[in-house]
Image: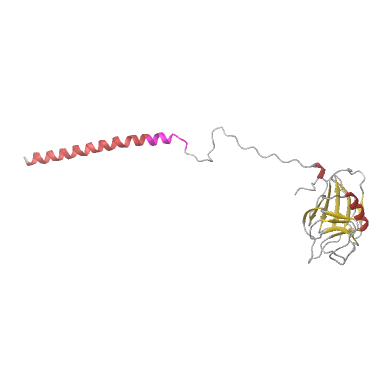
Amino acid sequence: MKFNALTGMVVAFLALVGAAGYLLVRESTPKAAVVSEQSGKPIAGADFAKPGAQPAAAPTAKPRDERFVIKRVLPITGPIKYGEWHWDEAGAPADGPLVMTVDLDARVLSVFRGGYEIGATAVLLGTTEKPTPLGKFPIIWKKADHYSSIYDGAPMPFTHRLTNDGVAIHGTKVEKGYASHGCIGVPNDFGKKLFAVTKLGDVVYITKGKRIGKGDSLVEG
């Protein structure tokens, strides 16, 4: 009888384990089905490529303004010497935009109208203590008969002021050994011609060592 009782207990235990296992399998099956349904969806973030998406078009390059493209340079042989200047408006448009460039290394100012160089001259520049500034400067004030209010009433004929602290293009004696207090000095006769063609707002680009020629833009780069 003991044997039969023990056998019955074992059989009952095995039946209980089997029933529990059956319940666990039933419970786990729906979960597996849910995972299977979710796995059919694309796993992707906001940057994942969408079906049929087209690549973004490259931005269109802005066309150059041909009025500021250099079309002619004056036929000057060799470096421009102190006191030397050139002026020739023949063939240049009468109403094109006027731009001046100043290269501190070459010590040369050039005048362009509609992309045609009409004037060029050697210039005086500032010293290490009072350097001529680099940058883009519109003409903010001009006067033909001007005298300095800072430097003992020194004559500054045909002045084109570029900054509020007094940096200007003006006529002076352009000779080797002379310098300015940051201004750009041009020969008086050149200054007179320049004064006759400029207006307020015309732009002066002051650079150091930049070389430009035919086909280059005066206002880009």
On the image, the x and y values in percent for residue 155 come to: 90, 62
Q: Report if residue 74 is visible in the image.
A: no
Q: In this view, does 67 lie to the left or right of 16?
A: right
Between residues 211 and 110, which one lies in front from this camera angle? 110
| Residue 35 on image: x %, y % | 39, 37
Q: Residue at x 11, y 41 (%)?
A: 6
Name the residue: 17% across, 40% down: 13
Q: Relative to the observer, which residue lies in front, 95 or 9?
A: 95
Q: In this view, does 3 lie to the left or right of 75?
A: left
Q: Is residue 122 magenta?
A: no
Q: Is residue 1 shown to the viewer in this render?
A: yes
Residue 177 location, x and y as percent?
87, 66
Q: In this view, does 52 lie to the left or right of 127?
A: left
Q: In this view, does 9 lie above or below 127?
A: above
Label count reads 0
139 or 207: which is nearer to us?
139
Magenta stretch holds residue 39:
yes
User: Which residue occupies the extreme left position in the image?
Assistant: 1
Extreme residue toward the front, this view: 149
Of 146 and 8, nearer the camera is 146
Q: Which portion, as a residue range, is magenta?
A: 34-42
Residue 41 position, x and y percent, is 45, 35
